[in-house]
Amino acid sequence: MDTAWFIGFMVIIGAVIGGATNSLAIKMLFRPYTEKRIGKWRVPFTPGLIPKRHQELATQLGHMVVHYLLTAEGLGKKLKSTAFMKAMNDWLSTELLKLLRSELTIGELLEDKLGVKEPKQTLLQKTESLIEKSYDRFFQENRYKQISEVLPRGVNEKIDHSVPVIAEFLLERGQALFSSEEGKERLSKMIDRFLLNKGTLGNMISMFLGNERLVDKLQPELMKFMRDDGTKRMVEEILEKEWAKLKQKDVSLIEDQLNKEDIIEYMTTALEKNVPFYQWVDQPLCDWSEPFEDMLVTNWVPKLVDAVSDLLALHLEGLLEKLNLEDIVREQVEAFSVERLEELVLTISKREFKMITYLGALLGGMIGFIQGLLVLFIG
């Protein structure tokens, strides 16, 4: 009976020591959190293992994450995977449709997201400023050049070839004018003024022929003159000579004839009226975006996702280097309190730590049993 009690006592002592030792070892991973001292003497095993190696742990974790977990190769494969591409397409398409079908206007988006006050007015001011700068730059660079040098070659050639057409147009308009009753009346007034300026001679001609008879005689002759091929050639030559003279003039001649403010205002107003974007700024997105929905979702979104994925995959290694992920992980781990780290580890591994404690007690009990037997046999 005494032997059984002795061996049982040894087993219990061994189990208590084994379990306590393992429990203490687990506790000493984290506790104490800080170094303990008695005077100048540091208490051994303080702080605990993880608090003592906190900075080294942070450095190693940062190195492991960058070199073994978040590698450029692994992230690149993930970016190009079919599942990721499909998920990105679905997400971007959904978000884009929500935006396009909303009651928000571009102006409101610019105000809310970018802080732009009065977007349309700001846009018009920027447009006006851009036109003014372009206007000033054009005349500054070309003011002392000949008009023929500034005009594009195609425009020069087109105007040269258009001279016969212009001459024919002018003569046709002249014929149409003077063959009408209005034209005949104007011609009669011109004859009146002409004869009036001739004094006595003019009065004599008017008295003998009569104004209406003179108009009736002059009008057919004027029409014949305008229909004559020689007249057409003469008008063409005049236009060609005048155009040739104009081309030799400096661009400054045109600048002097223009009003800068009027030109800028006209071009700004024309853009505002004819470019849809200026009207879209104040309209809800759902009012004008419907025709573009299918094109954007079906064509542009997949191309955009594919292009961005390719770009990221191509430059991912350099991007990760610039992000300094290793330093970020290290700083985050260093900033993570040991208390919180202990709580997190114990929450995840509480059951396993209990099993380690029980295993220590079991092994201690077995060792106590063996020791009891040895003591009995030796004694």
Image (spheres, rainbow, N blue to C red):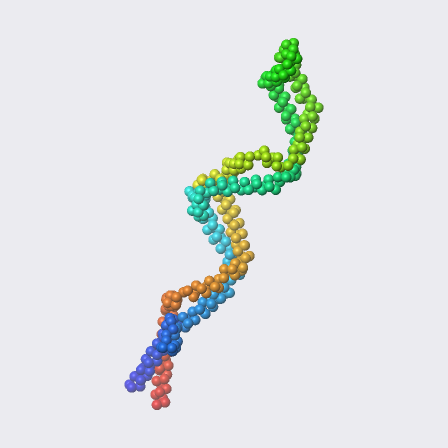
Front in this rendered view, residue 292 or 208: 208
Where residue 369 appears, x then y in whole percent? 35, 82
Position of 374 with respect to 126 (left or right) is left
Quadrant of the drawing holding the N terminus: bottom left
In percent of width and height, residue 105 lies at: 44, 42
Whether residue 79 is situated above or below residue 349 in the rendered picture: above
How many callouts does the rendering have?
0
Quadrant where the C terminus sits is: bottom left
Residue drawn at x 49%, y 41% is 125
Residue at the top extreme of this rendering: 208
- Please identify the residue farthest to the right as the structure is shown: 230
Q: Residue at x 44, y 41 (%)?
A: 284
Q: Residue drawn 58% across and 33% down?
A: 257
Residue 187 in sight here: no
Please report the residue visible at 71 percent of the width from the left and 24 percent of the height from the top. 230
- The image shows residue 37 at horizontal and vertical percentages of 37, 76
